[in-house]
Amino acid sequence: MLTAEEQKEINEELAHYPNKQAVCIDAMLIVQRRRGWVSDEDIHDIAEFLGMSTADLDGVATFYNLIRRKPVGRHVALICDSVSCWIMGCERVRDQLCARLGTTLGGSTADGRFTLLPNVCLGACDHAPVMMIDGDLYTNLDERQIDPILDRYK
Amino acid sequence: MSPMERPLTSNLRPDGNAVDIAAYERAGGYEGLRKALTMQPQDVTELVKRSSLKGRGGAGFPTGMKWSFVPMGANAPKPKYLVANADEMEPGTFKDRVLMEGDPHQLIEGMTVAAYAIQAEVGYIFLRGEYRCSAQRLRAAVAEAKERGFLGHNILGSGFGFELHLHISAGRYICGEETALLNALEGKRAHPRTKPPFPQVSGLWGKPTIVQNVETLCNVHHIVNKGPEWFRTLSRSGDGGTKLYGVSGKVNRPGLWELPLGTTLREILEEHAGGMRDGLRFRGVLPGGASTDFLVEQHLDTPMDYTEVQKAGSRLGTGTMVILDEGTCPVGMVWNLEHFFAQESCGWCTPCWSGLAWTEKILLAMEYGKAEESDLDTLRFQTKFLAPGNTFCAFAPGAVEPLQSALKYFSGDFHRHIEEKRCPWR
């Protein structure tokens, strides 16, 4: 079930577009912001709310990498793996993150605290390597900074 | 030359905070809009044509000409749309973010003037999802502009109305392709569309639509305010204006600078980026993002404009450069680029999704010393197979640009990986 607040936010977006399908991506992001991911049930509820078929909506959902169709940890770390960050040593940062958290890229920690995801260029190439945790951007990373940064996220 | 004018970045604050509407207006903001509203819409387009402004998103199409394809007059379809392409996802590119975070009203003013020129009633800023700070500041600025009467119904009593909305995208590089972007805005999978019809005639929901890059739009009101002749004198090239040039990689001062269009590669690298770091030797550069051909030492005196970079064998692209140094493996770098493109292919046409995946696998094998001489032939074949005309959109031809030039300039490094059965840098 979509909550009253979710429905209200989706309705606000509907005012900006000439038809209902146009807001389906916004709607999924609205639900995901509260629930962390978009479940099969959520897809069904959003599709019904917007008068779409669940198959059509899932087709849209699975195209976009920022819509998560699987559960994630409490915090999501996006590690930039594009060219500038690669030159500046993002592979070392990635290895340190994976070792420290005991998981791999695409995986989550056993305690549900973190999910690690590779991400394309985060647009801060003059401060590479970079990563983003829950919307906070961390720049000029080296292996020594990883522990203190991770400690901020419980 | 007189003290250099930097119309796009002169408002940016050293503390990195956004310029609010009061400070923006004190600095002459919204004057271009006031002036435009006293003109005939077609005359605004004419000024932009005469300024020689070309698109700053990568393709470099003349902006005024693009607008002149939009149907005008009482019988034109309604509504018309204007979309800012703020889906900055080209690896190595970080210029539009700086403009949106630092001076969000500049984009809003540029969009409103552009909307007036083509008589668009509705606009969207199509912003990539990871740009959280830009989203927050644009949202605040749109609200400020509405309150002051620069957006909405009957702007400044002119009778012209323009509603501007922020759309947060959910990812995928292909959304930067303008017709894929339109499908994303319509709530569909972001596959590119067949052209023609071109979006100027039939775009969003079948209505006339102009899609422009953020940096392009940020120039528009300056042109109206100060004139096309002024705009052309900003440049050292046949095309008008300044350009945001960025440098990343192992240089002393990676960063972003607004400079005259046509500033040479050498001047940008040495005077602005401070030269190579740690005494490393320069080996090559992607001059305009991941989808542009490498240039090398012999090209350092190339003026960075549309024509000259093309003559040198590459493209100005986004104007944000990625530097390859001698301590970095060219094969590994090209593998990283093709990994990106193989992953981001939208999957619509077979040459692209299949060819790029194949290309990436070969490059990965080569980087780890598991490739053979014949694999080089396959890579060369792919650069021809994915050339313009063989795929549905420009994605795959762009993807093989760095590969084809790497095979030309760094062939010795490819051979070493095969002969030594390992990466000499690992």
Image: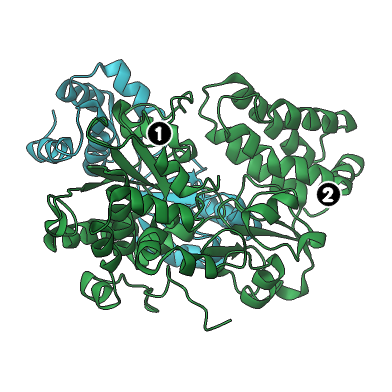
Q: Is residue B371 above or below residue B27?
A: above
Q: Which residue is mark 1?
A: A64
Q: Is residue B302 above or below residue A80?
A: below
Name the residue type under label 1. Tyr
Left or right of residue B291: residue B196: left
Q: Is residue A36 above or below residue B249?
A: above
Q: Chain of mark 2?
A: B
Residue farthest to the left, as pictured: A4
Label 2 sits on a secondary structure element that is loop
Q: Is residue B376 visible?
A: yes
Nearest the eye: B225 or A85: B225
Q: Which chain is cyan?
A: A
The mark total stands at: 2
Name the residue type under label 2. Phe
Spot occupied by residue B330 in the image (x, y as percentages of width and height)? 76, 51
Residue in view at x 28 percent, y 23 percent: A40
Residue A62 quadrant: top left
Left or right of residue B376: residue B261: left
Disc 2/disc 1 C-alpha distance (Å): 35 Å
Spot occupied by residue B197 in the image (x, y as percentages of width and height)? 43, 25
Spot occupied by residue B69 in the image (x, y as percentages of width and height)? 41, 37
Left or right of residue A112: residue B34: left
Residue in view at x 89 percent, y 32 percent: B373
Left or right of residue A151: residue B306: right
Q: Is residue A137 visible?
A: no
Q: Which chain is green?
A: B
Label 1 sits on a secondary structure element that is loop
Q: Which residue is mark 2?
A: B410
